[in-house]
Every structure is written in structure tokens, then in C-alpha cells.
Amino acid sequence: MRLVVVSAGLSVPSSTRLLGDRLAAAVGRQADVEVEVVELRDLAVEIAHNFTNGFPGRKLAAAIDAVTSADGLIVVTPVFSASYSGLFKSFFDVIEQDALAGMPVLIAATGGTARHSLVLEHALRPLFAYLRTVVVPTGVYAASEDWGAEGLDGRIERAAGELTALMSGLAAGRPARKGAEPEVVPFAEQLAALRPAG
């Protein structure tokens, strides 16, 4: 299965990228996945040009292809002004609206304070619901004080398990070619796949 991590971190090193890497590693411990990372920082100019001329540059086109053909996504953004970053939103704005329909997605964010943790529910989850993706129940937010503290590892493992279950269950039904209508999996079946057996 192909797992793509979309990281909107701006600094080097980036806590946003670090969280994305830890989430991908957790999925990798539970399933055989091929991981590709899309660093939006490297695509900022091409994203801006896409808005003005309507055509993606070579690197942006490759990133869009990687994201739309993945079996699952991990998307991670830093919090700016109590929401996702403009670069993060701009990237998903240049992707065709229906291109991610049915895609399993794990949402995550980083910020300086725990007070911004609701960004997962009031910004990220509605965005990916609008794109008709299948968002895992557990989102992961990491504030500065969370690194090395109890709790973050548990949230990472739980969210990774949910994404792995969805990827495994939906990958067989997801169309291989672009533009094809994805198989509709009833929500009750999706929830049942996430529950532990027994």
C-alpha cells in the first residue's frame, strides 16, 4: 500500500514534519506500506503560480499525482491564526475537488500551545469532509509540551491503527484510475473495521 505524508511545516527541522514521520512510522509497524513525503515548503512557488496561470509545475504535478493515487494520506499542518496554514489550504485548493473522494486520511497538527488543539475539529475535519475523504476518528495534535510527554505516543498509535484499518479495508475498493467513482462503503462497515476483534 502507498502512504503519502503531506507536511506543511516551514522550518528546518520542523516539528510538523517530525509528527508526520512518527505517524508514518507507526503505520509502518502495523502494515507493509511504501511511504512518500510531500514537503509543501518546497512547492510554495509552484502552488502560487498554479493559481495565476492555471497549470501545475513539474514538482507540483508530481506531488498532486502522488497524493491522488495514494492508498492513504497523513496530513500535518502547523497552526497559524487558530487554523491550518495558508500553504496547506492552497495545496488542497489546487487539487481537483473529487480527486480525493473515498481516500482514508489521518489529520494532524502542531502548535505552540494546547489551546489550539481544536483546530483538528473546527478546521481540518470539515475541510476533508468537504473533499469527501474518509477521516479517521482520532486526530493527533502536538503542542510544544507534548514532545516527550506521556500521551502523544498513545494517540499516534491509535490514529495509525485506525488509518491502517481503513487503508486495508478500502484499498481493494478504491478505483485504480483517476476520475473513476470510488466504491461506497457504508459508514457502519467502516466503524466495524476500526473496532478491535473479540
Image (spheres, grey):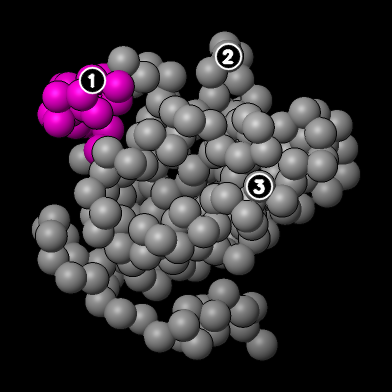
Of circles 2 and 3, which is in front? 3
Which circle, 2 or 1, is nearer the viewer?
A: 1
Horizontal and vertical percent for residue 188? 50, 87
Write down the residue under mark 1: 49
Q: Is residue 54 above or below residue 183?
A: above
Going by the numbered disc 3, the residue's amino acid type is: Val
Q: Would residue 73 be found to the left or right of residue 109 on screen? A: left
Q: Pick out the residue farthest to the top.
A: 12
- Label 2, secondary structure: give it: loop
Instruction: Return the x and y of residue 64 as percentages of the image width and height.
Output: 25, 38
**Residue 52: which quarter of the image?**
top left
Q: Which residue is mark 2?
A: 11
Q: What is the CA distance from the residue labelled 2 to the residue labelled 3?
A: 20 Å
Q: Residue at x 15, y 31 (%)?
A: 54
Q: Quadrant of residue 18?
A: top right
Figure quadrant of the C terminus: bottom right
Left or right, 20 with reference to 179:
right
Task: Give the camera-side residue of 176 and 55.
Answer: 55
Q: Earlier in the sequence, mark 1 or mark 3?
A: 1
Q: Which mark is residue 79?
A: none
Q: Relative to 160, say whether 61 is above or below.
A: above
Q: Residue at x 27, y 38 (%)?
A: 94
Label 3, on which residue?
119
Amino acid at the residue labelled 1: His
Amino acid type at mark 2? Ser
Tell me the magenta residue range.
46-64
Which badge, 2 or 1, comes first in the chain's sequence? Answer: 2
- Crowding near pointer 3: few (<14 within 10 Å), some, many (20+)? many
Q: Secondary structure at mark 1?
A: helix
Give the mark nearest the N terminus, 2 or 3. Answer: 2
State how far apart marks 2 and 1 are (Cα). Answer: 22 Å
